[in-house]
Image (spheres, rainbow, N blue to C red):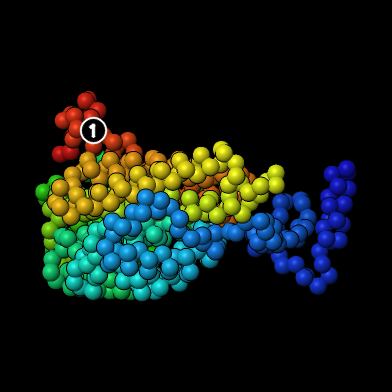
Amino acid sequence: MEVDKSLQRIARIAQQLQPAQNSFRRDSHEIEGGIEGMPTLGVGLPALEIEKAFPQATPATTFPPAVSDYFQLDDLLSEEELATRNRVRRFMEAEVAPIIAKYWERAEFPFELIPRFATLNISGGTIKGYGCPGMSILSSALAAAEIARVDASCSTFMLVHTCLGMLTIGMLASEEQKKTLLPPLARLDHVACWGLTEPEYGSDASSLNTTATKVDGGWLIKGQKRWIGNATFADILVIFARNMQTNQINGFIVRKGAKGLKATKIENKIGLRCVQNGDILLDNVFVADEDRIANINSFQDTNKVLAVSRVMVAWQPIGIAMGVYDVCHRYLKERKQFGAPLTAFQLNQEKLVRMLGHIQSMWLMGWRLCKLYDAGKMTPGHASLTKAHNTKVAREVCALGRELLGGNGILSDFNVAKAFCDLEPIYTYEGTYEVNSLVTAREVTGIASIKPPVSSRTKRS
């Protein structure tokens, strides 16, 4: 009886709160129907816009100026590299920053931006010809960093499309395959994804279970892929499978809508929420002979692509850290406590300078990695060390930024919380920190320690 009276009182209060003419809109996230036995109250007062709720600091929808180049590292860039960097920076600040937080909150991809990304002329990266820009690896890396500075999800979208999907075709496909596939991908009329990782094999990717069985006129692909970026909407899927005749890893082009192909979105991610990572099921998907990627005959061929993509991934945390620093630098000047801007407090200054130092070291390692690649001197250990180091110290940059913003450090409105979360999957993908460290350690010690000395895994027949 008391419970019933309480519910009636709640209902009366709710009716009083509802404006007569529905002047307050219903909250789009209100649960329809309510809990069984509980009246539906219909209270859905909209949240204040962040500018009104917290007018003392500017949110990331108006992205701050870039102020992290303390060592004047721009002097190391060519005119072409600077032009690319500045073009991408202007685009991200003007067109992506104002809208991206709402997509991140909803874990949706901003599809309307894809034609706009095409105008940047960066799709295809280092690939020459076939409508691709033929950029230097440093220009491509700078573009990846500048996109990540504002939003790491968009950076990952372009990385998967360009530095994995397109690059596999550009480096390892036949001439006919390149002519057919690359031009629409370069225009972003088509989007690519790259299917290597599986539910059972992540770091141990070369042991994949997906199979390719030869049949008349082509191949039947059977297996499962997981964590595949762009999977749910990609037009061209680059899929890796084990050739059952040779037991070697081969690559195949699977097209959207193929019979037996199913891609479903992975839900409940805390990072890179706009990236549409998916589970891909391949149930005897037929791939014609002409869609077997011509020059992928073993996992060593796949590693040629990973060598380049790991350079790009090493630049993503640089961009994320730069964006966090830029936001914090502006915020500390605008926000006041105890009658003084937060920049006036010694502890805040120390944290800001520590962040700045990390960014200089990350940038210089990334720059040197690109130069080693250009000179043909880059080893897997170089790329692995740079990726491991940069993701690790970028974590501290994000953590310091979260501290500096106080309560606002947990809001996506001010970028830092979003960047904090987005860095976590980057810390893991393209080789975990631990695996990348061991790749470098193998080069400097001469001892391989990635696999345990005694393995219980059964050998393949």
Q: Is residue 131 left or right of residue 71?
A: left
Tag 1 residue: 441
- Does residue 314 sit above or below 114 in this rendering? above
Toward the left, the furthest residue is: 246
- Residue type, label 1: Ala
Q: How packed is label 1: few (under 14 Cα within 10 Å), some, or many (20 or more)?
A: some
- Does residue 231 sit above or below 235 in this rendering? above
Q: How many numbered tags mark residues here?
A: 1
Q: Nearer the viewer, residue 36 or 312?
A: 312
Q: Nearer the viewer, residue 230 or 1?
A: 230
Residue 226 place in picture, x, y as percent: 35, 50
Query: What residue lies at 28% left-to-right and 36% top-to-bottom?
Result: 437
Toward the top, the furthest residue is: 454
Query: What residue lies at 53% left-to-right and 50% top-to-bottom?
Result: 328
Q: Which quadrant of the figure has residue 283?
A: bottom left
Q: Is residue 197 left or right of residue 337?
A: left
**Residue 201 showing in the rendered view:** no
Q: Is residue 178 left or right of residue 277?
A: left
Query: What residue lies at 45% left-to-right and 58% top-to-bottom?
Result: 66
Q: Which quadrant of the rendered structure holds the N terminus?
A: top right
Residue 352 place in picture, x, y as percent: 50, 44
Residue 389 place in picture, x, y as percent: 34, 40
Q: Nearer the viewer, residue 11 or 398?
A: 398
Where disc 1 sits, the SS reads: helix
**Residue 179 showing in the rendered view:** yes
